[in-house]
Image: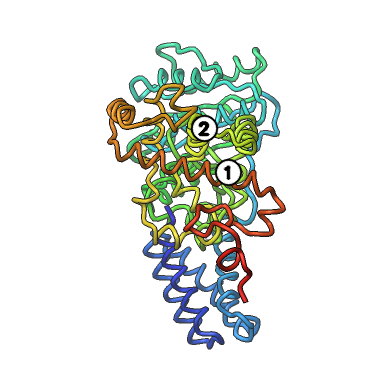
Amino acid sequence: MFEALSGRLSGVFDGLAKRGALSEADVMEAMREVRLAMLDADVALPVVKDFVNKVKERAVGHEVLDSISPGQAVAKIVNDALIDALGGAGAVPLNLSAVPPVPVLMVGLQGSGKTTTSGKLALRLKNRDRKKVLLASLDTQRPAAQLQLAQLAQQAGVTSLPIVAGQTPVEIAHRALDTGRREGYDVVILDTAGRLSIDDALMEEVRQIRDATQPAETLLVVDAMTGQDAVNTAKSFNEAVGVTGVVMTRMDGDARGGAALSMKAITGAPIKLTGSGEKLDALDEFHPERVAGRILGLGDIAGLVEKAADTLDHEEGERLAQRMMAGKFDLDDYASQIRQINKLGSISGILGMLPGMGKIKDAIGDKDLDQSVLKRHLAIISSMTRAERSKPAIIKASRKKRIAAGSGTTVQDVNKLLKQFDMMSSMMKRFNKLGLKGLMRQGMSALMPKGMGGGPPGGPGGRPFR
């Protein structure tokens, strides 16, 4: 969601890097571009002013103007200011240090993803923190809201409070905490009703629930796609009921990112969690320094490693690695590899977490990063017999026609897959033949097919170049 802002800021720093030594006028011009970029990204005006003033103050000092690489020095100052604007380095954890059952109050407008986020939070607390969680819907306004939360609880493998018709939200909250105490629950998540817009009735209801339950956390769920409206909503809720943290949903959307940058400065409440997707496991801690790094094209290696550790099947990875080393890699293994990649999310998203890949991603274009190719490969492999998957060499013209018809693809698509698989198999055979020492001596080009950098190193016949 920060792609537009990231592109604009990268352009500013590229321009500074080309100039060598910087004058005060150069810094002022760069700050003007930064201000326009942030306003274009829908960042609140007071936040933009404060941000630019902070950067300007430090950037016109001697340590930058006299620096060997002033462009990098300014980029570092902007990075630090971005981290401050987002809430300071390090994720802010949920406060669950209270006598169980710990009440967590979920508030927000209708349509912000509050009920889904309640389900996601329950799953996260159950799996990561080993908490016994009770979900309770206090939404008596929206039809089937309580049933929706009950279904989410079932998917997450946690308990939902039984529905009793005719109870008020405050009565349901009391019953939820009583049940939590009697049955030994660690956390009770209270999902309140929302409205299409902020009104006095909504705020009064939330205030009554807050006073009745004394929650350890009051989490405001806001939709990042609503831009400045999300900031205004947060401000109103914070003034009315006191918000301890913010959960931003739809962080995988194409919004301009200004709400995230404005939230901490306007409300004083840190962003604690972010949602990116409809799946119940798509809820992550918010790390300001990682988000700042991605905005400035520095990547988020730590986030990628965490994501891989959480989502990938490590036993399957070990099995595949052993088969590769033994030269027994077949199309079943290739399909397993594709499924592992799909678990990490979109290829564009993975590249966005790698340092310096933003520009490469722009140059390639989204079309070539489209995961439909991988899905097509899975469909083709699924249409093959077991013998064909283990020995692709037996796949001739008639078999190709049958596979293409069964997978809804063309014979050309089948040929492309088989060609790619042949190249991978050839590289693995060369790797096994060379061994690690041979690979270090001859380099990665030794793995390539002949005509693409393969063959003996040096000139014709293996003679070294002079």
In this rendering, the answer to whether 115 lies above or below 272 is above
Task: Tell me if 265 is positioned left or right of 250 in this view.
Answer: right
Relative vertical location of residue 235 with respect to residue 9 in this rendering, above or below: above
- Is 45 placed above or below 309 here? below
Residue corresponding to mark 1: 428
Amino acid bearing label 2: Asp
- The circle on residue 330 is 2
Within 10 Å of disc 1 (Cα), the crowding (few <14, some 14-19, many 20+) is many
Q: Is residue 408 visible?
A: yes
Question: How would you rate the neighbour count of disc 2 (Cα within 10 Å): few for under 14, some for 14-19, many for 20 or more?
Answer: some
Quadrant for the C terminus in the image: bottom right
x and y, in percent, of residue 18 in the image: 50, 81
Which numbered marker is on residue 31?
A: none
* Image location of residue 169, percent across then percent down: 46, 22
Residue at image position (60%, 22%) is 133
**153 displayed left or right of 233:** right
Residue shown at 62%/45% (left/top)? 305
- Classify 231 as above or below 106: below
The amino acid at mark 1 is Met
Badge 2 element: loop
Asked which quadrant contains residue 179, the reply is: top right
Q: How is the image coloured?
A: rainbow
Q: x and y percent of residue 225 in the render?
A: 37, 47
342 or 119: nearer the viewer: 342
